[in-house]
């Protein structure tokens, strides 16, 4: 049986779509459709159910995918390992949220850059980077959500602690953490709220986890980068919920104050996501492993 047909079949199976499978393979959709029909003719059974949106595997298709995937991935690894040893210029495309990618992931990968790896970083929301990863625009994605489906494989990377912060003058005006703890959200009603999005994602998460209440405030300042939000908070514009790693230095110096220190702080989980099968490629596997190792210190 032609390995190229099996490779096309596996790409479509993982992508759940002829169109997306064609993009990942660098082929036209008619070419992919023709290859799948040829393979179905050789097997004598349909491999996919054609749906309104994409395809789902038949029972025969599921069994074939289960049998061939480990072997095709192993062949890819063997082939690519040789290419990797011959070339120090392999490039990894990494996508993720701007702050975490810039301050955590990219610095952690500088050692691999010293070893000859080339790195390209792109920023975007979880939805944007997952779409880009699925379309083949990136090799690894850092996300705060776990994707569904067979196309993408996800590993938990790390948890970040969320902290409610403001400039010291706001903390003094409120009467300190003890008052906020006693009064709850009512103590914070007159403090301007700052966030990266109109939906106030981090503050909404914090209110639900710490106060067990929905957030009723709307944003006074919205800036699509937590570093910009941090600068606004430092200049006294109001309060924000930020990852501790982003503001730890300012908390330690007294430039910022934590308005509350709950006994169980709310967390946000980051995931490291790749397209299924691509960890057979040594340069992607090495980057994946390096990030997992570095995250132990995050």
Image (cartoon, grey):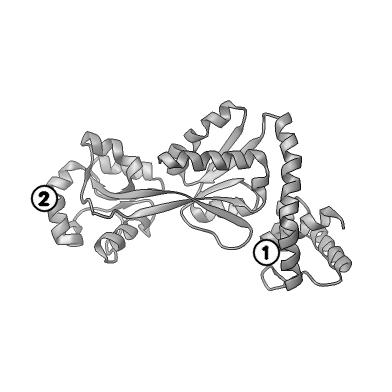
Q: Residue at x 74, y 61 (%)?
A: 67
Camera-nearest residue between 203 and 58: 58
Q: To which quarter of the image does residue 211 belong?
A: bottom left
Q: Which residue is drawn at 77% across and 55% down?
A: 7
Residue 80, position as x, y percentages in the image: 73, 40
In the visual, does 233 lie left or right of 2? left
Q: Which residue is drawn at 37% across and 57% down?
A: 201
For label 2, the residue is: 175
In the image, residue 119 above or below residue 192: above
The quarter of the picture where the N terminus appears is bottom right
Q: To which quarter of the image does residue 88 belong?
A: top right
In the visual, does 71 lie left or right of 263? right
Q: What label sits on residue 16 in the rendered view?
A: 1
Q: Distance between the residues labelled 2 and 1?
A: 56 Å
Camera-nearest residue between 65 and 150: 65
In the visual, does 65 lie left or right of 283? right
Camera-nearest residue between 252 and 280: 280
Image label count: 2
Residue 289, position as x, y percentages in the image: 55, 41
Work out which residue is located at the far top of the displayed protein and give it.
114
In the image, residue 161 above or below residue 46: above
Residue at disc 1, secondary structure: loop
Q: Which residue is drawn at 43% across and 41% down?
A: 296
Residue at disc 2, secondary structure: loop
In the visual, does 138 lie left or right of 12? left
Q: To which quarter of the image does residue 209 belong?
A: bottom left
Camera-nearest residue between 295 and 13: 295
* Other-residue count near label 1 (Cα within 10 Å), few / some / many at <14 / 14–19 / ≥20: many
Q: Earlier in the sequence, mark 2 or mark 1?
A: 1
Residue 107, position as x, y percentages in the image: 47, 33
**Can see residue 122?**
yes
* Other-residue count near label 2 (Cα within 10 Å), few / some / many at <14 / 14–19 / ≥20: few
């Amino acid at each position: 049986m032609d390995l190229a047909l099996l490779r096309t079949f596996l790409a479509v199976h993982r992508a759940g779509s002829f169109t997306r499978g064609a993009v990942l393979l660098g082929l036209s959709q008619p070419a992919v459709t023709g290859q799948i029909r040829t393979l179905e003719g050789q097997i004598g059974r349909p491999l996919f159910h054609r749906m309104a949106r994409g395809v789902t595997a038949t029972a025969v298709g599921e069994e074939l995918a289960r049998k061939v995937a480990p072997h095709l991935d192993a062949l890819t690894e063997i082939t690519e390992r040789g290419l990797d040893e011959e070339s120090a210029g392999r490039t990894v495309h990494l996508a993720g949220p701007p702050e975490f990618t810039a301050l955590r992931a990219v610095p952690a990968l500088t050692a691999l850059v010293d070893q000859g790896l080339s790195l390209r970083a792109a920023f975007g929301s979880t939805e944007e980077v997952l779409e880009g990863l699925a379309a083949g625009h990136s090799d690894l994605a850092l996300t705060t959500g776990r994707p569904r489906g067979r196309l993408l494989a996800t590993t938990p990377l790390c948890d970040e602690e969320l902290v409610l912060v403001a400039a010291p003058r706001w903390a003094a005006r409120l009467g300190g953490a003890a008052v906020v703890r006693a009064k709850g959200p009512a103590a914070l009603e007159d403090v301007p709220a700052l966030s990266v999005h109109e939906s106030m994602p981090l503050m909404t998460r914090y209110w639900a986890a710490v106060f067990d209440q929905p957030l009723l405030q709307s944003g006074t300042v919205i800036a699509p980068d937590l570093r910009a939000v941090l600068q606004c908070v430092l200049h006294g514009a109001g309060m924000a919920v930020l990852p501790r790693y982003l503001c730890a230095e300012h908390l330690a110096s007294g430039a910022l104050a934590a308005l509350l220190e709950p006994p169980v702080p709310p967390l946000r989980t980051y995931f490291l996501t790749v397209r299924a099968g691509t960890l057979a490629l040594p340069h992607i596997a090495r980057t994946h492993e390096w990030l997992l190792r570095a995250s132990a210190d995050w």
